[in-house]
Protein backbone atom coordinates (compact mmCIF):
# COMPACT_ATOMS: atom_id res chain seq x y z
CA UNK A 1 0.00 0.00 0.00
CA UNK A 2 1.42 3.38 -0.95
CA UNK A 3 1.80 6.03 1.71
CA UNK A 4 -0.75 8.74 2.32
CA UNK A 5 1.07 12.01 3.00
CA UNK A 6 0.16 15.56 3.92
CA UNK A 7 3.16 17.87 3.53
CA UNK A 8 3.35 21.57 4.33
CA UNK A 9 5.40 24.03 2.31
CA UNK A 10 5.93 27.12 4.42
CA UNK A 11 7.71 29.04 1.64
CA UNK A 12 9.30 32.37 2.67
CA UNK A 13 6.96 32.92 5.60
CA UNK A 14 7.56 33.23 9.33
CA UNK A 15 10.68 34.25 11.18
CA UNK A 16 12.54 31.71 13.32
CA UNK A 17 10.50 32.31 16.47
CA UNK A 18 7.18 32.12 14.64
CA UNK A 19 8.25 28.95 12.84
CA UNK A 20 9.34 27.27 16.07
CA UNK A 21 6.03 28.20 17.71
CA UNK A 22 4.03 26.71 14.84
CA UNK A 23 6.09 23.51 14.75
CA UNK A 24 5.70 23.11 18.53
CA UNK A 25 1.95 23.59 18.32
CA UNK A 26 1.67 21.05 15.53
CA UNK A 27 3.93 18.59 17.33
CA UNK A 28 1.78 18.73 20.47
CA UNK A 29 -1.44 18.53 18.53
CA UNK A 30 -0.40 15.44 16.53
CA UNK A 31 1.17 13.73 19.54
CA UNK A 32 -2.17 14.05 21.30
CA UNK A 33 -4.12 12.80 18.30
CA UNK A 34 -2.06 10.57 16.00
CA UNK A 35 -2.61 11.25 12.30
CA UNK A 36 -3.79 8.58 9.87
CA UNK A 37 -1.20 9.61 7.31
CA UNK A 38 2.43 10.66 7.17
CA UNK A 39 2.85 14.35 7.94
CA UNK A 40 5.81 16.45 6.79
CA UNK A 41 6.64 20.12 7.25
CA UNK A 42 9.02 21.75 4.78
CA UNK A 43 10.46 24.96 6.19
CA UNK A 44 12.98 27.64 5.28
CA UNK A 45 16.58 26.47 5.81
CA UNK A 46 17.07 28.64 8.88
CA UNK A 47 14.32 26.83 10.80
CA UNK A 48 15.50 23.29 10.22
CA UNK A 49 18.15 22.75 12.88
CA UNK A 50 16.07 24.36 15.64
CA UNK A 51 12.89 22.50 14.79
CA UNK A 52 14.73 19.17 14.43
CA UNK A 53 15.70 19.46 18.13
CA UNK A 54 12.16 18.98 19.41
CA UNK A 55 10.05 17.62 16.56
CA UNK A 56 8.93 14.03 17.05
CA UNK A 57 10.01 12.81 13.64
CA UNK A 58 8.13 9.54 14.14
CA UNK A 59 5.01 11.64 13.74
CA UNK A 60 6.11 14.65 11.68
CA UNK A 61 8.86 14.52 9.09
CA UNK A 62 10.97 17.60 8.50
CA UNK A 63 12.15 18.87 5.16
CA UNK A 64 13.69 21.76 3.25
CA UNK A 65 12.04 23.60 0.37
CA UNK A 66 15.06 23.41 -1.90
CA UNK A 67 18.73 22.46 -2.02
CA UNK A 68 21.69 23.35 -4.22
CA UNK A 69 22.51 21.66 -7.51
CA UNK A 70 26.18 21.53 -6.52
CA UNK A 71 27.82 19.32 -3.97
CA UNK A 72 29.93 21.90 -2.11
CA UNK A 73 32.31 24.80 -2.52
CA UNK A 74 32.29 28.39 -3.71
CA UNK A 75 28.56 28.90 -4.31
CA UNK A 76 27.76 31.91 -2.14
CA UNK A 77 24.34 31.78 -0.55
CA UNK A 78 23.59 28.20 -1.52
CA UNK A 79 22.69 25.35 0.86
CA UNK A 80 23.73 21.84 -0.12
CA UNK A 81 21.79 18.62 0.30
CA UNK A 82 24.45 17.44 2.77
CA UNK A 83 23.90 20.59 4.85
CA UNK A 84 20.14 20.02 4.85
CA UNK A 85 20.66 16.44 5.96
CA UNK A 86 23.02 17.52 8.73
CA UNK A 87 20.26 19.59 10.36
CA UNK A 88 18.25 16.43 11.02
CA UNK A 89 15.84 16.96 8.11
CA UNK A 90 14.74 13.95 6.07
CA UNK A 91 12.95 15.49 3.10
CA UNK A 92 13.45 18.12 0.43
CA UNK A 93 11.02 19.65 -2.05
CA UNK A 94 12.55 19.88 -5.52
CA UNK A 95 11.10 21.44 -8.66
CA UNK A 96 8.46 23.66 -7.11
CA UNK A 97 6.95 25.84 -9.83
CA UNK A 98 8.09 28.96 -7.96
CA UNK A 99 11.70 27.74 -8.20
CA UNK A 100 11.25 26.84 -11.87
CA UNK A 101 9.67 30.19 -12.69
CA UNK A 102 11.41 32.78 -10.50
CA UNK A 103 14.84 31.16 -10.23
CA UNK A 104 14.90 29.63 -13.71
CA UNK A 105 15.53 26.10 -12.52
CA UNK A 106 15.68 23.91 -15.60
CA UNK A 107 15.00 20.17 -15.84
CA UNK A 108 18.77 19.62 -15.98
CA UNK A 109 19.37 21.60 -12.77
CA UNK A 110 16.52 19.75 -11.05
CA UNK A 111 17.96 16.43 -12.15
CA UNK A 112 21.24 17.32 -10.40
CA UNK A 113 19.38 18.38 -7.26
CA UNK A 114 17.48 15.09 -7.14
CA UNK A 115 20.70 13.09 -7.49
CA UNK A 116 22.44 15.06 -4.76
CA UNK A 117 19.43 14.89 -2.42
CA UNK A 118 19.26 11.13 -2.80
CA UNK A 119 23.02 10.70 -2.49
CA UNK A 120 22.70 12.45 0.86
CA UNK A 121 19.82 10.32 2.07
CA UNK A 122 17.04 12.87 1.65
CA UNK A 123 13.57 11.88 0.47
CA UNK A 124 12.57 13.97 -2.52
CA UNK A 125 9.13 15.51 -2.98
CA UNK A 126 9.24 16.36 -6.67
CA UNK A 127 6.76 18.92 -8.04
CA UNK A 128 5.27 18.89 -11.52
CA UNK A 129 2.34 20.76 -13.04
CA UNK A 130 1.17 22.88 -15.93
CA UNK A 131 0.47 26.61 -16.27
CA UNK A 132 -2.98 28.01 -17.03
CA UNK A 133 -1.96 28.62 -20.63
CA UNK A 134 -0.83 25.03 -21.01
CA UNK A 135 -4.04 23.70 -19.44
CA UNK A 136 -6.15 25.88 -21.73
CA UNK A 137 -4.23 24.53 -24.71
CA UNK A 138 -4.91 20.98 -23.49
CA UNK A 139 -1.20 20.34 -22.96
CA UNK A 140 -1.23 19.31 -19.30
CA UNK A 141 -0.41 15.64 -19.94
CA UNK A 142 2.44 16.50 -22.25
CA UNK A 143 3.87 18.95 -19.68
CA UNK A 144 3.84 16.61 -16.70
CA UNK A 145 5.26 13.75 -18.77
CA UNK A 146 8.13 15.94 -19.96
CA UNK A 147 8.82 17.08 -16.38
CA UNK A 148 9.06 13.47 -15.20
CA UNK A 149 11.26 12.50 -18.14
CA UNK A 150 13.45 15.57 -17.82
CA UNK A 151 14.46 15.20 -14.17
CA UNK A 152 13.47 11.79 -12.77
CA UNK A 153 13.40 9.09 -15.41
CA UNK A 154 17.19 8.82 -15.38
CA UNK A 155 16.83 7.23 -11.91
CA UNK A 156 17.04 3.51 -11.37
CA UNK A 157 13.76 1.84 -10.40
CA UNK A 158 15.02 1.51 -6.84
CA UNK A 159 15.83 5.22 -6.57
CA UNK A 160 12.63 6.31 -8.32
CA UNK A 161 10.66 4.36 -5.73
CA UNK A 162 12.02 6.69 -3.02
CA UNK A 163 10.51 9.77 -4.70
CA UNK A 164 7.15 11.32 -3.81
CA UNK A 165 5.47 13.20 -6.67
CA UNK A 166 3.43 16.35 -6.10
CA UNK A 167 1.13 17.36 -8.93
CA UNK A 168 0.55 21.09 -8.59
CA UNK A 169 -1.26 22.91 -11.38
CA UNK A 170 0.38 26.34 -11.37
CA UNK A 171 -2.98 28.04 -11.91
CA UNK A 172 -4.19 26.63 -8.60
CA UNK A 173 -1.21 27.58 -6.41
CA UNK A 174 -2.07 30.35 -3.98
CA UNK A 175 -4.90 31.52 -6.23
CA UNK A 176 -7.85 30.05 -4.34
CA UNK A 177 -8.73 28.10 -7.53
CA UNK A 178 -8.53 24.38 -6.87
CA UNK A 179 -8.59 21.75 -9.56
CA UNK A 180 -11.85 19.84 -9.17
CA UNK A 181 -11.40 16.42 -7.63
CA UNK A 182 -12.24 14.87 -11.03
CA UNK A 183 -9.74 17.07 -12.88
CA UNK A 184 -7.05 16.19 -10.36
CA UNK A 185 -7.88 12.48 -10.41
CA UNK A 186 -7.72 12.39 -14.19
CA UNK A 187 -4.18 13.75 -14.34
CA UNK A 188 -2.98 11.79 -11.30
CA UNK A 189 -4.12 8.60 -13.05
CA UNK A 190 -2.28 9.74 -16.17
CA UNK A 191 0.91 10.44 -14.18
CA UNK A 192 0.67 6.97 -12.66
CA UNK A 193 0.29 5.46 -16.13
CA UNK A 194 3.43 7.26 -17.34
CA UNK A 195 5.34 5.90 -14.34
CA UNK A 196 3.97 2.42 -15.08
CA UNK A 197 5.17 2.63 -18.69
CA UNK A 198 8.67 3.50 -17.53
CA UNK A 199 9.08 1.45 -14.32
CA UNK A 200 6.20 -1.05 -14.34
CA UNK A 201 2.84 -1.34 -12.61
CA UNK A 202 4.21 -2.28 -9.22
CA UNK A 203 6.38 0.84 -8.95
CA UNK A 204 3.55 3.03 -10.24
CA UNK A 205 1.16 1.51 -7.71
CA UNK A 206 3.59 2.18 -4.89
CA UNK A 207 4.31 5.82 -5.81
CA UNK A 208 2.60 8.45 -3.66
CA UNK A 209 1.23 11.27 -5.82
CA UNK A 210 0.16 14.32 -3.84
CA UNK A 211 -2.12 17.11 -5.04
CA UNK A 212 -1.17 20.73 -4.40
CA UNK A 213 -2.95 23.97 -5.19
CA UNK A 214 -5.29 25.83 -2.84
CA UNK A 215 -5.98 22.65 -0.89
CA UNK A 216 -7.79 23.31 2.39
CA UNK A 217 -9.81 21.48 5.02
CA UNK A 218 -13.03 22.01 3.07
CA UNK A 219 -11.87 20.44 -0.21
CA UNK A 220 -9.28 17.93 1.07
CA UNK A 221 -11.76 15.11 1.83
CA UNK A 222 -13.13 15.07 -1.71
CA UNK A 223 -9.67 15.27 -3.28
CA UNK A 224 -8.08 12.65 -1.01
CA UNK A 225 -10.97 10.24 -1.56
CA UNK A 226 -9.90 9.82 -5.18
CA UNK A 227 -8.13 6.59 -6.04
CA UNK A 228 -4.93 8.16 -7.37
CA UNK A 229 -4.62 11.10 -4.98
CA UNK A 230 -2.47 10.12 -2.02
CA UNK A 231 -2.54 13.34 -0.02
CA UNK A 232 -1.49 16.93 -0.49
CA UNK A 233 1.32 19.44 -0.65
CA UNK A 234 -0.05 22.42 1.17
CA UNK A 235 1.15 26.02 0.97
CA UNK A 236 -1.02 28.73 2.54
CA UNK A 237 -3.07 26.37 4.68
CA UNK A 238 0.06 24.91 6.31
CA UNK A 239 0.82 28.20 8.08
CA UNK A 240 -1.76 27.77 10.84
CA UNK A 241 -1.92 24.67 12.98
CA UNK A 242 -5.73 24.42 12.89
CA UNK A 243 -5.88 24.79 9.10
CA UNK A 244 -3.16 22.20 8.50
CA UNK A 245 -4.63 19.81 11.06
CA UNK A 246 -8.00 20.19 9.33
CA UNK A 247 -6.43 18.86 6.12
CA UNK A 248 -4.63 16.01 7.93
CA UNK A 249 -7.98 15.07 9.45
CA UNK A 250 -9.35 14.40 5.95
CA UNK A 251 -7.71 10.98 6.38
CA UNK A 252 -9.66 10.22 9.57
C1 LIG B 1 2.34 25.09 -2.98
O1 LIG B 1 2.91 26.12 -3.30
O2 LIG B 1 2.97 24.03 -2.90
C2 LIG B 1 0.91 25.16 -2.75
C3 LIG B 1 0.19 24.10 -2.96
O3 LIG B 1 0.42 26.39 -2.35
P1 LIG B 1 -1.09 26.74 -1.93
O4 LIG B 1 -1.60 25.59 -1.08
O5 LIG B 1 -0.99 28.02 -1.16
O6 LIG B 1 -1.86 26.86 -3.19
Image (tube, helix red, strand yellow):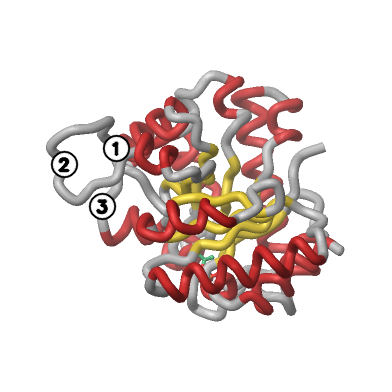
Depicted 141 relative to depicted 73: above or below? below
Q: Which residue is mark 3?
A: 104
Labelled pair 2, 1 in contact (Cβ < 8 Å): no
Mark 2 vs mark 3, foreground winner is 2
Residue for point 58% across, 45% down: 165
Q: Depth-wise, is mark 1 or mark 3 nearer the camera?
A: 1
From the image, tell me which residue sits under label 2.
75
Q: Earlier in the sequence, mark 2 or mark 1?
A: 1
Closest to the observer, 217 or 33: 33
Q: Earlier in the sequence, mark 1 or mark 3?
A: 1
On-image quarter of the N terminus? top right
What residue do we see at 43% from left, 52% from top? 49
Decide: marks 2, 3 in contact (CB < 8 A)? no
Mark 2: give few (<14), some (14-19) or many (20+) Cα within 10 Å: few
- Please, what secondary structure does the residue beneath circle 2 have? loop
Q: Nearer the viewer, residue 85 or 53?
A: 53
The answer to whether residue 205 is left or right of residue 210 is: right
> Alpha-carbon distance for marks 2 and 3?
17 Å
Could you say where residue 190 lies in the image, as x and y percent from the top left? 66, 44
Q: Residue furthest right?
A: 252
Q: Residue furthest front?
A: 53
* SS for dot 1: loop
- Residue 62: percent from left, percent from top: 55, 51
Amino acid sequence: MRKKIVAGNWKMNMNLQEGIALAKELNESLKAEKPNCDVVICTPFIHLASIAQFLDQNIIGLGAENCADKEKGAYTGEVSAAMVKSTGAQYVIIGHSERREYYKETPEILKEKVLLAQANGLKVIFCIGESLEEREAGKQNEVVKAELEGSLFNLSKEDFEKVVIAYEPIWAIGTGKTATADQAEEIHAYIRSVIAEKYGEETADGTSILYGGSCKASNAPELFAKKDIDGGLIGGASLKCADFKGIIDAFN
